[in-house]
Image (cartoon, rainbow, N blue to C red):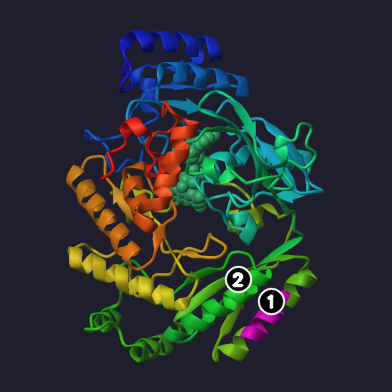
Amino acid sequence: VAIPPGVNSRDWDAALRQFRQAVGESWVFTSDEDIALYRDAYSPLWGEREERLVSAAIAPDTTEQVSAVVRTANQFRIPIYPISTGKNLGYGGSAPNLSGSVVIDLKRMNRVIEVDDKRHFAIVEPGVAYFDLYRHIQDRGLKVWIDCPDPGWGSPVGNSLDHGVGYTFGGYRDHFQAHCGLEAVLPTGEVVRTGMGALPGAKTWAEYRYGFGPTVDGLFAQGNLGIVTKMGFHLFPAQEAYQNSVVTVPRRNDLIPLVDLVNELEHTGLVGQPVYGSPLGGPPGAFPPELAGLLKRPGGPPADDLDRFAAERKRGSWTCRLQFYGSPRVIAAHIEHAKERFTSVIPGSTFQDGELLRFPLTQAQLDRVHKVAVGIPNMSIFSIGARTELNPSPSDGHLWFSPIIPKTGEAIFDAQRVFMEAFATLGRPSLVTPFSTPATWMHRAFIFIMAFPISRTNVQQNQRNRETFRTLVRVAAEHGWGEYRTAPAFQDDVMAAYSFNNGALLRLHETIKDAVDPNGIVAAGRSGIWPRHLREPRP
Ligand SMILES: Cc1cc2nc3c(=O)[nH]c(=O)nc-3n(C[C@H](O)[C@H](O)[C@H](O)COP(=O)(O)OP(=O)(O)OC[C@H]3O[C@@H](n4cnc5c(N)ncnc54)[C@H](O)[C@@H]3O)c2cc1C
């Protein structure tokens, strides 16, 4: 059995006894087989000495049990690392920042406490997966939708606490923004509730976020001040119908007014998530020879030539899928309005309307709809990149590089250029092309996301990718872009980029950490915030 760092074997044995008393013998895991399940399946450090491993895992069933476990951990100074459903693939999986930490696995706390379909909210425990919440709602015929990320096996609590994102309307897609009130166990074992939840017998826990006084909820997301045991979320009222329409614009520089117009529609609340693309795009290295020739021109591809290329093939330069929700009449009016705006501002805009879907869907409609856009959790994203005849050696996973850039066409062009140049300078194959478009999960910013492959056998490839990743973090920061989320292996690098006033933000986090968790037991190192005894001395 591995022992957490800084703990002697006598204390460790005593702590294990107390953990077992608190949660029951069978819910403390120490065997190699059991703890291997908490390796990050997509670890960029797979098999290397620095890989983040756990020493044990504990699965409490109630807030009281969490509290008892935390008190013991505090007594013996045992580092602990909470997870909800532990599916954070691409951003660290269920592995901790500090090797040897004990994972507090909250999967057994899977109670849906309340769902209200008149006031549109839910209160859930951390082990409730998106699938569970969806089933709870469907079984009872409740008139609310959830907003889910691509993999339905994650949880509203775990996902939102890493600032995760989804696919419907702006305010719901940003899952932490949609949260409302939480309960957390502090490093001392004390239980705290935020917002209206702090009022005993509160009637509006999941409706009014602020309660009274300073809001502290944000400290628990990407933070390490406690273990969240309940959370409220605002939900989207169930919609009568859904339809999308894809707008195509002809010229390369039309991207700038395209984004401005889509912003106008989205920030007014007329469309859900916009999805950008380019009919000229494709994986790097897979362009037809004529286009590849244009792209190689020194100084980048001339816009006029690209426009001619697109026009000759009747393809257009950029597309955006606009998604509309509401009654069929409302949808028709919103689509008409959008078309008027585009045709008056961007000459040559064309539209392709999708099927009008009324709920409930037929099985055939369900099979073809993009499920997350209508709040239906599923796992189909994992078919992308799966082993097929055309892709006989898929990677073992991937690492997300997720810089936030402004929501403008100019910023997209800048990001393409800057990251392509960075890959070229490093002599690495580029993950970016002149047709790359950003992800749009955030309501008010773009994510210029890239996936670096992970290998379980090629350590050298992982090392090179880690170096490239770190360089891109620095290059992004030089241009005023920062990552919104990252795996533990890079959290110190990303936090270092948020360096205004000689790292004042990190110093504030450290001051709070030292005050709330003086023994530094909870999620040491998360977001680059280390407890005092593990911190490098500051100059
Ligand atoms: C192919 C693919 C597609 C993906 N698509 C998306 C997507 O569309 N949107 C998206 O957001 N992500 C996406 N991801 C990333 C990830 O899979 C999801 O975000 C997933 O929901 C996170 O796992 P989880 O919900 O089980 O959270 P967990 O792994 O349980 O939690 C994440 C982290 O939050 C902290 N935490 C969790 N619970 C607690 C708690 N109770 N108290 C304190 N801290 C806690 C921990 O540090 C933990 O490591 C994708 C990944 C892959 C591989």
- Label 2 beta carbon within 8 A of ligand 1: no
Q: Are marks 1 and 2 in contact (CB under 8 Å)?
A: yes
Residue 109, quarter of the rendered image: top right
Examine the rendered structure and indicate whether residue 500 appears above or below residue 331: above
Disc on res. 322: 2
| Quadrant including the C terminus | top left
Disc on res. 335: 1
Callout 1: SS? helix
Instruction: Tell me if I can see residue 87 in this picture.
Output: no
- Depth check, front residue: 380 or 297: 297
* Residue 30 horizontal/vertical position (percent): 39, 17
Q: Amino acid at mark 2?
A: Leu
Provide the major secondary structure of the magenta segment.
helix
* Segment colored magenta: 334-341
Horizontally, is 89 left or right of 71 in the view? left
Q: Which residue is at a point 47% across and 44% down the rendered structure image?
A: 222
Q: Which residue is at a point 60% across and 42% down the rendered structure image?
A: 130
Instruction: Tell me if I can see residue 208 in this picture.
Output: yes
Callout 2: SS? strand
* Residue 525 horizontal/vertical position (percent): 37, 38
Q: Amino acid at mark 1?
A: Ile
Q: CA distance from mark 1 to mark 2?
A: 9 Å
* Residue 303 horizontal/vertical position (percent): 36, 87
Disc on res. 428: none
In magenta segment, residue 340 = yes
* Residue 466 horizontal/vertical position (percent): 25, 50
| Quadrant including the N terminus | top left
Q: Which residue is at a point 57% across and 54% down the rendered structure image?
A: 174
